[in-house]
Amino acid sequence: MLKLTGITKTIPFEFTDFDGSAHNLEVTEFTVGDIKNVVSIQQPVLEDKEMDVVDQSEIIVLSRIVCSIKVQGTDVPFWSSIEDFKSKNYPNNLVNELYPLVNKLNPVVAAEDFDEKKKRILSDGYDLLIKRICQYLRRPVFEVMQYPASELEYWSLYFSIDDNQDKPIIKQESVSVEASKKAFRKLWS
């Protein structure tokens, strides 16, 4: 069974700064803390009705880059803020090179995509079974998805038994106490 280790997915890369110094960095899958940071950066921008849409878009993209790229092997962001990133005066194509890496591990999910995925799960027996097991065991989805197919087959069988309709099929025979003791001794001798 899959153990919960707290390991996030990463894409390592080497970044050479203007001064020629090389940095070992990695794009990381967003953690809950990263998402909180992204939201705290983006929320005031999105609520500012007077801000230009292009400026809003730039801040949204840069917040995702700044919160996702860290010093390799640590949780320390390479840039402390959007202002720190902008102060370096990097060439414009740097954002175009970094954003696809960030988006690979942290894709932006549109509302339609969410609804389509929900419809797919609701129409697929396998996914519904995983949903039910997750609810029953109170285990994370990614853990249950690691179960072997044979185990999922048994879960499906057990969930299909209706206690009100399906009665146990066990033949009950009348056996005397002496016969029962004799059969028991026979088993253990």
Image (cartoon, rainbow, N blue to C red):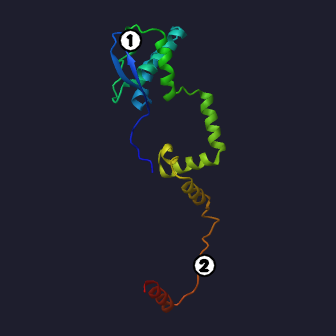
SS assignment at label 2: loop
What residue lies at 42% left-to-right and 9% top-to-bottom? 90
Mark 1 lies on residue: 83
* 52 with respect to 82 (left or right): right
Amino acid type at mark 2: Lys
- Above or below, 54 against 157 in this view is above
Distance (Cα) linking label 1 and label 2: 77 Å
Q: Is residue 82 above or below residue 70?
A: above
**Residue at the location (49% across, 87% down)?**
183
**Frontmost residue, 128 versus 44:** 128
**Which residue does the image show at 37% across and 8% down from the upper left?**
87
Q: Quadrant of the C terminus?
A: bottom left
Q: Can residue 173 be seen in this snapshot?
A: yes
Above or below, 12 against 87 in this view is: below
Residue occupied by mark 2: 171
Q: In the image, what residue occupies the spot 64% across and 39% down?
A: 120
**Residue 46 shows in this picture:** no
Against 65, residue 124 (above or below) is below
What x and y, as percent, mark residue 26? 40, 26
Image quadrant where residue 123 sits: top right
